[in-house]
Image: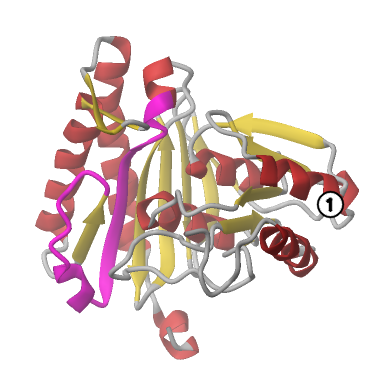
Amino acid sequence: MTEEKTKTLDLTAELEFAKAVAREAATIVSTFYVGSSEVQYKSPNEPVTEADHSANEHIIARIRAAYPDDGILSEESKDDLIRLEKERVWIVDPLDGTKEFIARNGEFSIMIGLAVEGEPVMGVIMQPDPGLLYVGGKGVGAFLYENDEEIPLSVSDVTDLKEMVVVSSRSHRPQIVDQMRRSLRITSERVSGSVGLKVGLISRRLADLYVHPSPGCKEWDICAPAALLEAAGGVMTDCWGNPLVFNKRDVRAHNGLVASNGRRHDDIIATVSRICEEFGYNEDDGFW
């Protein structure tokens, strides 16, 4: 996106719309959370529930009614690739952290992002339990809504790698991440489910770094978090420091991702990329 377009981008209406829709979807998800939700499996390690489908139907219907000319990419909707012809694309994960939802530990979220010309410009992340709403957008800033209070968000100023807090996944912990942490000499760690909630912790200064060196994330996992983190002053790239591009035909993040407070991002990337290559991965081929 050109600098001129970025300056003239007004996302006020889209942010208000996305905030309302995320809260509506949270109400839907919460009815299943306190009750019951049938679990099916898209693959041996990918559960999906009635809550995923119900929230997805509501979000997609609302976007189509409000922004009929925009494209849509959602985890739980068939991708007809029409979105590739669109400049603006809504990128949705109606329930990020389905395993955490099933475990009833609260670490799941609803994520609605907007990409314009491949760049993440707006993101809304709703955590139904305990009712936190993260909002971020270009030219708008980043905010947390908690109990009707609007709290401005900004990443930490920590520059000493040894003092940084890394946020790790609750449901999986690859050996390569432990090696990266040791090489960076980071000893403090928080654990969380959902990519959106991990990035939310960074935006709230409760963590400083998240590394995901695998192709497991897809565009709907990272569009809203990327927009939120940038609005809060942080940085998200792939594991070799390249910008993340959205609305691609292949929605996988084949080169993984690194999200940080941005203060030492280049130094972190130097270590992360070196270890990736020591494990047999390279920038051209990614993680598979």
- Residue drawn at point x = 53 percent, y = 49 percent: 143
Residue closest to the eye, 105 or 129? 105
Instruction: Please name whichever residue, 177 or 238, is drawn nearer the observer in this view of the structure.
Output: 177
Q: Position of residue 109 (x, y in %)?
A: 41, 35
Residue range of the region highlighted in magenta in the rendering: 75-99
State whether residue 103 is above or below residue 161: above
Q: Position of residue 136 (x, y in %)?
A: 48, 56
Q: Is residue 223 above or below residue 76?
A: below
Residue 258: x percent and y percent?
62, 57
Left or right side of 203 for 179 = right
- Please report the residue visible at 80 percent of the width from the left and 55 percent of the height from the top: 157
Point out the image quarter for the N terminus: bottom left
Determine the residue located farthest toward the top in the rendered image.
Answer: 35
Using residue 177 as the reference point, say whether residue 23 is left or right of it.
left
Q: Nearer the viewer, residue 197 or 130?
A: 197
For the point 75% across and 34% down, the residue is: 189
Considering the numbered disc 1 on the image, is that residue within a helix, a strand or a loop?
helix
Whole-percent x, y for residue 236 in the image: 59, 62
Specify whether 92 is left or right of 267. left
Residue annotated with mark 1:
184
Please tell me in which quadrant of the rendered image residue 127 appears: top left
Question: Is residue 124 visible in this depiction of the protein?
Answer: yes
**Number of disc labels:** 1
Density class for disc 1 (Cα within 10 Å; few <14, some 14-19, many ≥20) is: some
Q: Is residue 205 at all visible to an observer of this figure?
A: no
Q: Is residue 285 magenta?
A: no
96 drawn magenta = yes
Amino acid under disc 1: Leu
Residue at the location (67% across, 59% down)? Answer: 276
Colouring scheme, one of rainbow, by chain, secondary structure, one colour: secondary structure
